[in-house]
Image (tube, grey):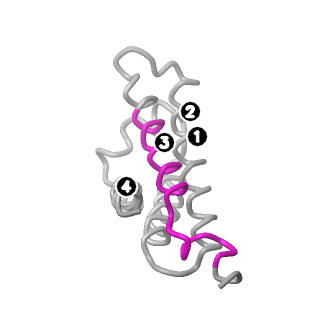
Amino acid sequence: MQTKAIAYWITTILVAFFIGSGGVVQMVQFPGNSHGVVPVLGYPMYFMAILGFWKALGAIAILVPRFPRLKEWAYAGIFFDLTGAAASCAAVGGYGVYAFHIIAPLILAGFTVASWALRPQSRILGALARQ
């Protein structure tokens, strides 16, 4: 049981760190961050700020106690964001040198699924009603 808790917190902290820090950088629209998303993928800059806002909130949601329904939505949103990022990069031919931009989000999506699957009972939707 202790191993499961440690694995949960490691994967959750990794996901929250990468999603949260990326979200903050997108919100403040740091110029170096948009080099690939805006010109290569064609997304507008305002989309970066909106996406960053929701990513930062999602990272907070998976860390704070209680709110199991909010956590379900946050995990789903993070998973959709990461798989969408990989698909977007693959769609514009992000192979070769840019393969990192396909592989990295998929690895983090795997950590997201692991964090979701390893949650303690108190963070699972419906668990509070059964107690």
Q: 10 Å neighbourhood of mark 3: few (<14), some, or many (≥20)?
A: some
Work out how far the residue at label 3 is from the one at label 1, CA to CA, in angstroms.
Answer: 14 Å
Precedes in sequence: disc 4 or disc 1: 4
Q: x%, y% of residue 27?
A: 41, 62
Kind of residue at disc 1: Gly
In the displayed structure, 91 sits above or below 21; it is: above
Work out how far the residue at label 1 is from the one at label 2, CA to CA, in angstroms.
Answer: 6 Å
The secondary structure type at the circle numbered 2 is helix
The secondary structure type at the circle numbered 3 is helix
Kind of residue at disc 2: Ser
In this figure, which residue is indicated by the disc labeled 4?
Answer: 7
Is 111 colored magenta in this rendering? Answer: yes
**Which mark is on residue 88?**
2
The secondary structure type at the circle numbered 4 is helix
Q: Which residue is at a point 50% across and 68% down the rendered structure image?
A: 120
Q: Which residues are magenta?
A: 104-127
Assess whether mark 4 and mark 2 are in contact (beta carbons under 8 angstroms): no
In this figure, which residue is indicated by the disc labeled 1?
Answer: 84
Give the number of callouts. 4
Work out how far the residue at label 3 is from the one at label 2, CA to CA, in angstroms.
Answer: 18 Å
Precedes in sequence: disc 3 or disc 2: 2
Work out how far the residue at label 4 is from the one at label 3, CA to CA, in angstroms.
Answer: 13 Å
